[in-house]
Amino acid sequence: MRLASTSYLRSISSAATGEVVWLGITTSVKWVYRAQERLERVLRDSGADMVYADRFQVINGEVIEAPTIAYQAGSLRDDFDFGEVLLFRREAFERVVEALPEYEYAGLYALRLAMQKIVHVPEFCYYASMEQSGESQFDYVNPANRAVQIEMEQAVTAYLKHIGAFIDYRALKNFRSDSKEGKPTASVIIPCKNRVQTIADAVHSALKQQVREPYSFNVIVVDDNSTDGTKEVLAEIKDERLIVIHQDKTYHAIGGNWNMAIHDPRCGQYAIQLDSDDTYSGPDTVQQFIDKFEEGHYGMVIGSYQLTDIDGNPLPPGKIDHAEWTDDNGMNNALRINGLGAPRGFNTELLRSIDFPTTKYGEDYAVGLRISREYKIGRIWDVVYNCRRWSNNSDANCTIEQLNRNNRYKDWIRTIEFEARLQRNACQ
C-alpha cells in the first residue's frame, strides 16, 4: 500500500464523490458490522484529514489481531503500517494530490506527509485476507529497490523543507578531540548478555584486528549479568587488551552497557561497535575506522556489512551499504529510515556528551540522529562486518506486539529529533 504513483492518486481524486475518499489495496477486506460508518463519523468528529484503524489479518485461514499504532510527528518512515484501508477527507485529499510532483512510487507517501491531522482509530474495524508476507527488514536497502528509495527521499526532503526541519549539510561541523595521551586510539565495544554460543567468536574477531603504529586498540566487553556460561567463556580468553566489565543487577539494557563502556577511563578515543553475535569481516576493520576518523574528523563513522548465517556463509541480499546515505542529505533522509547502518564508530568524547538511552532497542538510532543534526558523519563503503542471522537474534521472530512496541519507540525518537530540528532552525 505504501507505493502509489501520483497519476493513480489523481485518478482516484477525479472519480471521488461525496465528502470522503476511501483508499485501499487489492487485499480482500471484510468489514466489521457498521465499521465503515464508524470511521466516517470519527473523520468528521475529529476534524481529521485522514483516519486509519486496527484490523484482523486472515493468513492461510488463520485470523490474528493486527493492531496498528498511533501516528505522531516522528512517524516519518515510509513503511509506517496504516493497515489496508485509509479514509481521507475529500477536500484535503484533492488539495494535496493536485499539488503533488509526478512520483512513480512515492505518491502515497508524499500524500500522507502532507496531511495536517491523521487520526488512529484503536478499534478492530475489518478483516484483511492476505498471503504471508515474505518482506524482509532489509528489503529497503536491497539495490533492486533503489529507484523507490530515491523517490521516497525526494518526498521526505521536500516535506522537511516545507515544515522547517531540514538540515543544510553546509552547517554541519567536524569534531576534534582533546588530548589523546594515555589512552588507546580505539576501543571495540561489545555489550552482551547470555551469548555463550557466539561471544568467543566476537571477541576473537576483535582481538585479531591489526593496526599500524602509532595506533593502538583494546576490547571492552560489558557483560550484563549473563547466566548461561558467557562469563566463564570470557574468563578463558587471556589477552591484556581484553577488558571485561561485569554490570550490577540494576537495569542497563544495550544502551546502558554502552554507557558503562564509553565512560570507563580505559575507553579509547574512538568507540567501535561489535555486537556479541557478529564478527568483523577482516583484520583491518578497526584500522579502516581509525583512518576514516583521522581523515575527516567526523563525529561518527558508519561502515557496511554483509548478511551471513551463523557460520559466515553469505545470505541475500548480501552487502548492506545504506547507499541512501549521501553527504549532502543523509542527515535528513535518516528521519525516513529505521537505521543508519553498521558497524558504527563514535568519537568517544562527543558520545560521552550525548549518552545512549538506556534501552535494548533503537539506542544506536537515537544517538545517530542526534549526531547527524550537528556533526558530519563519515562512511566506509567496503564490507567490514558480518551481521550473522540466527534464531537468537534480538529481532528474530518478533510478534506483532513487539514490532509495534519497537516501531512506536523509534517513531518517538524521530519525534524528539524532529522537534529539536524545528527549534534549531527557528533559532538561526
Image (cartoon, grey):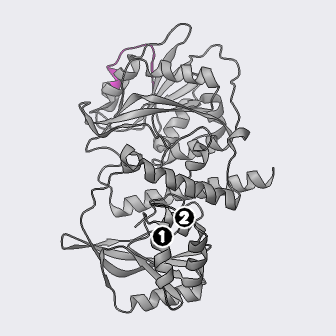
Q: Nearer the viewer, residue 329 or 247?
A: 329
- Image vertical order of residue 211 relative to residue 42, above or below: above
Q: Is residue 29 magenta?
A: no
Label 1 belongs to which residue? 7
Badge 2 element: helix
| Image position, residue 394 (x, y; %) | 35, 46
| Image position, residue 417 (x, y; %) | 63, 53
What's the residue at 50%, 61% (across, down)? 103
What's the residue at 42%, 31% (across, down)? 274
Name the kind of residue labelled 2 in the image. Ala
Q: Nearer the viewer, residue 189 or 175?
A: 175
107 sits to left or right of 375: left
- Image vertical order of residue 239 relative to residue 244, above or below: above
Q: Earlier in the sequence, mark 1 or mark 2?
A: 1
Name the kind of residue labelled 1 in the image. Ser
| Image position, residue 344 (x, y; %) | 50, 34
Point out the stretch of residues depicted in magenta. 234-244
Q: CA distance from mark 1 to mark 2?
A: 13 Å
Rendering quarter of residue 90: bottom right
96 sits to left or right of 225: right
Label 2 belongs to which residue? 110
What's the residue at 35%, 63% (across, down)? 400
What's the residue at 81%, 52% (across, down)? 427
Q: Is residue 239 magenta?
A: yes
Asked if the residue at tag 2 contacts the one at tag 1, i.e. Cβ–Cβ closer than 8 Å, the answer is no
